[in-house]
Image (cartoon, rainbow, N blue to C red):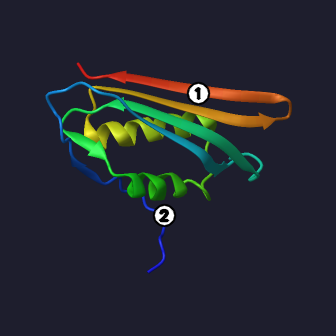
Amino acid sequence: MASRPSKTIETFANPRPGREYEIRFDCPEFTCLCPLTGQPDFATFTITYIPDELCIELKSLKMYLWSFRDEGAFHEKVTNQIADDIIAAIKPRRLRVEGDFAVRGGIGTVVVVDHEAS
């Protein structure tokens, strides 16, 4: 069966919940659409987190990021949406989502969202 995009972020139990350690994902093939022109926007996302009880399953993250391919969204919106969805799925101790969008019209954009559990 072929893979399909999905808005679901699957998780698994943190194998070392008593230890603070960092997990980093580099996602250099992110695409979405400009909400004004419909043209593709390309970005590299770096997602860094310190898990609490749950970790992100990688294939589901790939399918989740793929789900944005045909959606129009401003860079700020999509970066914050990714952060919000990860926070809802795993409730990490700390999270940083960085969207480094390719240059368009001579301007590059980097959007960074930081979250720390209270």
Is the residue marked by circle 1 packed among few (<14), some (14-19), or many (20+) residues within 10 Å?
A: some
In the image, what residue type sits under mark 1? Val
The label on residue 85 is none
- Residue 70, located in which quarter of the rendered image? bottom right
Residue at 39 percent across and 57 percent down: it is 60
Return the residue found at the far bottom.
1
**Is residue 5 visible from the viewing direction of this image?**
yes
Q: Residue 111 carries which label?
A: 1
In the rendered view, tell whether residue 3 sits above or below residue 30.
below
Q: Which numbered dot is residue 5?
A: 2
Can you tell which quarter of the image residue 59 is in? Answer: bottom left
Quarter of the image for the N terminus: give it: bottom left
Instruction: Please tell me which residue is depicted at 26% across the width and 23% down the height of the picture.
Output: 117
Residue 61, given in percent of the width and then of the height, sits at: 42, 51
Q: Is residue 75 above or below residue 67?
A: above
Q: Is residue 81 above or below residue 93?
A: below
Q: What element carries label 1?
A: strand
Query: What residue is at 21 percent from the left and 32 percent from the top?
Result: 52
Answer with left or right where residue 41 lies relative to residue 47: right
